[in-house]
Amino acid sequence: MDTAQISSLNLETSSAPSTQAEVERLLTSRRIELSGPAEAVEFFYQKGWTDGLPVVPPTPEKVSEFLEYAGKLPGDILGMIPARNRVITAEKVAINAVMAGCLPSYMPVIITAIEAMCQEEFNLHGISATTGGTAPLLIINGPIAQQLNINSGVNCFGPGVRANATIGRAIRLILLNVAGSIPGVLDKACLGHPGKYSYCIAEDEAGNPWGPLSVDRGIPPDPDISAVTVFAGESPHFVNNQAGGSGERIIGSIVNTMMGTLYRGGNWLLVLCPEHVTVFKQESWTKAQIREAVYKRAVRSLADFKRLNGLPDNMIQLEDDKTIQRNIDTPDDLLIVTAGGKAGGFSAVIPPWAAGADTRPVTRAIGVCIDCD
Amino acid sequence: MTNKFIVLDPTLEVETPRVERAPRPSQIHTIGLLDNGKQNSDKLLQNLARMLVAQQPTLKINYYRKPGAYRPAPAALLDKVAAECDAALVGIGD
């Protein structure tokens, strides 16, 4: 089935008006009868259907409530993973969203993220099977971030906020239960990282003197449009610069963090904290200037790159000393997002998957059908 | 319990279709080596090729390489290997 067929299928099935009770009658998942919620929690552990934490039992009533909110019918197809011969339906997404502890109102974000992750350029199969251990990071832009209270501020990568914790968790449960990314089976991550439990932030647009990330990524600059960007990222690497000093000095700190890794190519994500944003703003830096400065300075010789990668001397040629190796191939490969608490000079760099350009971030508007007429 | 508590299965519930092995060829004239594109996989496969030719000097070796290590082999490439070889060696070299 190709993409055109999928969208026509969506249109066909979604156009019929439906109540929660009608949706419930259309659920096709196997129904399991248990004595109550406590038994359900243990049953899901026994079946290996959790991320290691207890889940909210997905009852048909809750699942159909989620689908009804999203305006989806159970059989609507949200995406496919051809390499695994797997189809992701709205019903399975809703079940896992209930399990994650989501509210029904989170469904549009989750659905859009799944659709984005199933675009070919994201390479979902690769990024969720690799020894490299990346996780899809969701970055939310637009009014939905405030409506759902998605944290873009203090401790945004950490715990404490339901939307961030459970939207990211729903994505992981879908990867485990529907996509089959079972650790040790299809997910061969050497270490993995904590973002594989949940990896979801919003952009601090109020504290952003530039345009939002979604607009950089081609979404129209309309204050009513919200969007999700999915980025296959390693864990955040902090850029510890408390003194600020100047934009140039902060660039130096960013580049130092990038060069502490041996990743090259692909897209990188720079999360700028408010203190660092303030310095750039005072000096009237544009995002394009930040990208250009990082691109120019994140460079070492190929010889150094090979040495640090552990290659033996006999694989390092004389000309490698003069050959330049950049962390990013073009300035535009650096994505910039503003987030974090008001106090503290800690920005972060999120390197790409080790395979670099074999995954690309995808940005999609929420609740807007791009393929529709 | 008098009240039933129903939950739904969160998994795909689709049994992976069982794929039978192709019949073993009685004679192998041409063998394909499919390089998965990882560093050093070429060396591993070329050594294997030498060992096979030492055992059967008339053996023809066809060498194929995936366009990239990080994506599945394109169907057209797999069809080509199947059409041109009696058997193929595939695996992950790193």
Image (cartoon, coloured by chain):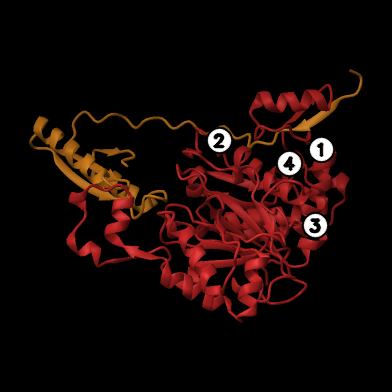
Chain colours: A red, B orange
Label annotation for residue A60: 1
Amino acid type at mark 2: Ile
Q: Which residue appears at 41% of the width and 30% of the height? A: B20
Q: Is residue A1 left or right of residue A55?
A: left
Viewer-closest of A185 and A195: A195
Q: Nearer the viewer, mark 2 or mark 3?
A: 3
Amino acid type at mark 1: Pro
Sort mark 3 into few (<14), some (14-19) or many (20+) by Cα contacts within 10 Å: some
Image quarter for residue A227? bottom right
Q: Can the viewer see residue A311 in this picture?
A: yes
Q: Mark 4 = which residue?
A: A100
Q: In the structure shown, which secondary structural element does the residue marked by tag 4 occupy?
A: helix
Residue B65: percent from left, percent from top: 28, 50
How much space separates mark 1 and mark 3, taking CA atoms? 27 Å
Viewer-closest of A80 and A18: A80
How much space separates mark 4 and mark 1, taking CA atoms? 15 Å
Task: Give the answer, above or below, for where A191 lies relative to A358.
Answer: above
Label annotation for residue A149: 3
- Residues at marks 4 and 1 on the same chain: yes
Question: Which of the image's four quarters has the N terminus of chain A?
Answer: bottom right
Residue A23: percent from left, percent from top: 82, 46
Sort mark 4 into few (<14), some (14-19) or many (20+) by Cα contacts within 10 Å: many
How much space separates mark 2 and mark 1, taking CA atoms? 25 Å
Q: Which residue appears at 24% of the width and 67% of the height? A: A322
Q: Mark 2 = which residue?
A: A182
